[in-house]
Amino acid sequence: MKNKALEAVLGDGFTFMKRRLGDRTLPYQHWGCECGDEWFELINSLCGELESAYKQRSLTPDIRVLQVKQKFGRLRFYYTFEGEKDGLVIDFLGSGTLRIGSADDGISEDIKNLRSEIKSIVSKYEEKSATVCELCGEDGSLCRLQKNYYKTLCERCCNELAKKS
Ligand SMILES: [Zn+2]
């Protein structure tokens, strides 16, 4: 995001969004949220729901945020868990993110449920991002600005940006 103060709010609000200075190992640590400022509310609510999923179970969040970005006009929120390999994440145009994590061996039912809840929270917000303009926060939809360059925008922002590009 352009507005670093907004990113700081995320880092102060959620332990798993806290960026460690000088850590360049993960895209999120390096770049923060690679999307427009207007998705702040969306990401903030997403993180809030993740946190309550842990709180309900009296667990400390063990989610590791790998990358938060805009791709094909949609929010992508890539994550893994502490102690897990970073795994593979595959993106498809127009659908959510497919995570190929480690096997569920040795994970309790409780954690399995938690992880599937996390997965649906993340997909819910990834879906939602396709309906929120990245520039002004109004209702938006996928807008093609140039070849292979998409953003989720409202009609007004789409027209304005199309004029500029
Ligand atoms: Zn707009």
Image (tube, rainbow, N blue to C red):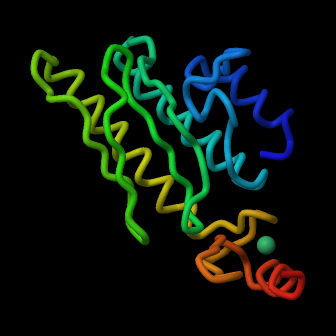
Question: x%, y% of residue 68?
Answer: 58, 43
Of 57 and 136, the residue lying toward us: 136
- In this view, 33 is above or below 50: below
Question: x%, y% of residue 36?
Answer: 75, 55
Question: x%, y% of residue 22?
Answer: 71, 15
Of 47 and 86, the residue lying toward us: 86
Q: Is residue 155 left or right of residue 100?
A: right
- In this view, 27 is above or below 17: below
Q: Is residue 149 left or right of residue 110?
A: right
Q: Residue at x 66, y 71 (%)?
A: 151
Question: x%, y% of residue 56?
Answer: 39, 21
- Give the quadrant of ligand 1: bottom right
Q: Is residue 83 left or right of residue 124?
A: left
Q: Residue at x 49, y 56 (%)?
A: 126
- In this view, 145 is above or below 116: below
Q: Residue at x 86, y 33 (%)?
A: 5
Which residue ends up furthest to the left in the rendered image? Answer: 105
